[in-house]
Image: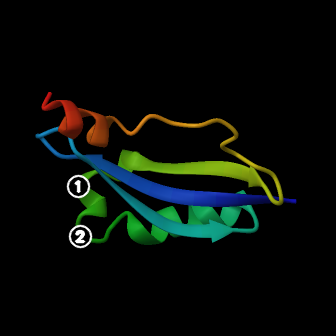
Amino acid sequence: MKVFVLQHVNVHPNGIENVKMIGVYSEEKYAKEAIRRLNCKPGFSDSPSQFFIDAYELDHDHWSEGFVDEFRKSRATGE
């Protein structure tokens, strides 16, 4: 079974991303309906093209590898 995750991302002038997890929906059409409801709201109306819908299979790993924490790495090395 798939679910549809709706997020909104806006990038500040300093390059920092602000990601908002809006919701998880059983059908893509419900995620699209949420976008229509939110498009006119403060903040969202400033960047209406920054909504993203991603489909995920339930009961599956969607990140199966490790990662490097660049923030901690840069703090440790002073970079």
Q: List x then y, in percent, for residue 5.
A: 61, 59
Above or below, 75 against 41 in this view is above
Instruction: Tell me what residue is drawn at x 70 percent, y 40 percent.
Output: 64
Q: List x then y, in percent, for residue 4.
A: 68, 58
Left/right of residue 22 with respect to residue 19 in the rendered view: right
Count of number-bearing discs: 2
Occupied quadrant, residue 24: bottom right
Q: Which disc, if any, is residue 17?
A: none
Q: Residues within 10 Å of mark 1 (few under 14, many from 20)?
A: few
| Quadrant where the image shows the C terminus | top left
Q: Are marks 2 and 1 in contact (CB under 8 Å)?
A: yes
Viewer-proximal residue, 10 or 68? 68
Viewer-proximal residue, 23 or 67? 67
Q: Which residue is mark 2?
A: 42
Secondary element at tag 1: helix
Name the kind of residue labelled 1 in the image.
Asp
| Quadrant where the image shows the N terminus | bottom right
Q: Residues within 10 Å of mark 2 (few under 14, many from 20)?
A: few
Q: Residue furthest front?
A: 76
Above or below, 42 against 16 in this view is below
Q: Which residue is mark 1?
A: 46
Occupied quadrant, residue 49: top left
Instruction: Tell me what residue is drawn at x 49 percent, y 62 percent.
Output: 35
